[in-house]
Image (cartoon, rainbow, N blue to C red):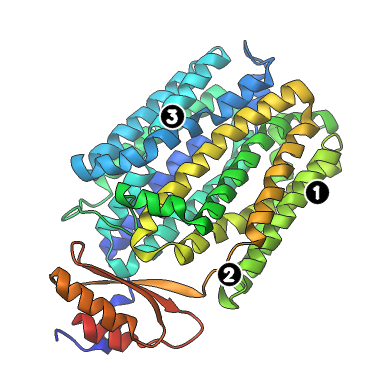
Amino acid sequence: MSSTPKQSKTNLEKMTATELRASASLASIYGLRMLGMFLILPIFAIYASTLPGGDSQLMIGLALGAYGLTQAIFQLPFGMASDRFGRKRVIYVGLVLFAIGSLVAGFAHDLSTIILGRSIQGAGAVSAAVTALAADLTREEHRTKAMAMIGTTIGITFALSLILGPVLNQWIGVPGIFLLTGVLATAAIFVVKYVVPDPVSSHFHSDAQAQTGKLKEVLRDKQLLRLNFGIFALHAAQMAMFVVVPFAINQSSNLTTNQHWLIYLPVLLLSFVLMVPAIIIGEKRAKLKQVFVGAIALMLGAQLLFAFSIAHFWGIVFSLGAYFIAFNILEATLPSIISKIAPAASKGTAIGVYNTTQSLGVFVGGTAGGYLAHHYGNSVVFVFCSVLMALWLIFALSMKKPPAVKSKMYHLKKISADQAKKLAVALSGLKGVRETVVLAEEGVAILKVDMQQDWDEAAVLKLIGE
């Protein structure tokens, strides 16, 4: 035995400087790219209405959601290509595509060209490759922390974009924002080249990457399908909202487009304050389903309130407040539930399908929102969103309670397939262990352990030879 279990546990608690550097720099890549996607959301619809083709809200919705379609198409293939051609090479290609799309949109003089630019932006779908690189650069026991850093960056970027978008619009306009995102994408290339460490070795990680052999299993899982519909509905409603709300704020108030941040800032701050206790109650007290279902019900209420009060300023403000409280809780809890419900050996595939469905929601929401607003009026957009939320609420109510478990992963010395089977049986018999997968080809053991009772990690470390 190379070290005592107590020593091993102590040594595993902290990320190394290289792991911290890798996690922080890759999170910044995500953040820079997401900033490019989100910055235009609060102000794009009004700008687009001044361009040739902008008299059609359908075209505006297509321009907002176009990147979602190409991102959904290329997301998983980019991740798989990174196994063959190298993580950084694939990320370079994706960032170059994103930069080109930003330039096309920035220099566009009509909405059709912006749709083309947004489609090219989406084609630079590097998220799966970035996740795979993060897995290469972090030890198994710290991978969850790295992914959490990336996820937190996305949430913060979205919130900042709603505030910064109107401010930047005042200084450089929407074309300038597109060009700025192209510059940010170019800067991200240099971050990947000179800041992100080069992995010693790259190999497949079942907890972080999708594999085609697991797709059928994941797509047949009714619990996961409920969550996939949920993220689809959540982001469809988000994109549909931004087709309508900027116009509604201008029409119902004396605020200019550049002043919309005065609304978004307080409602976002309120939503973050209320989100924290909800997450604590869900995770620490094993009330995740109750919090989750409650947030969906609140989102349904927000959409109905939008439908009935979209022409009234304070109705819009209260609707946005309820919306962002629900949105932030759902964005935080959905990945956690996926992690708890997905089979340990298929977690990466489950997350890949989930992310693809999210991107499809962006496209469908933008397109449907634009079509409905153009032909039937703003209120009908939120009737559509309310139907999506009502269906999600029904699915969530019938969903199994997520188990109160957390995932633990351990690196193994080289073992045979027979040894892996025996080790899996031995680990499964330990106190508090709810699911075990030992992957000899990856050299890892993945455990789901009970959060509500003590589990014997010392025994785990002893069995795996630490």
Q: Residue at x 58, y 24 (%)?
A: 62
Q: Is residue 7 left or right of residue 72?
A: left
Q: Nearer the viewer, residue 242 or 348?
A: 348
User: Which residue is rendered at x = 75% and y = 52% of the image?
Assistant: 322
Residue indicated by mark 2: 401
Badge 1 is on which residue? Answer: 318
Which quadrant of the figure contains the C terminus? bottom left
Q: Secondary structure at mark 3?
A: helix
Does residue 27 show up?
no
* Earlier sequence position, callout 1 versus callout 3: 3
Callout 2, which amino acid? Answer: Lys
**Residue position marked by numbered label 3 in the rendering:** 121
Q: Closer to the camera: disc 3 or disc 2?
A: 2
**Which mark lies nearer to you, 1 or 2?**
2
Which quadrant: the N terminus?
bottom left
Task: Label 1: state its secondary structure.
Answer: helix
First of labels 3, 2 by sequence position: 3
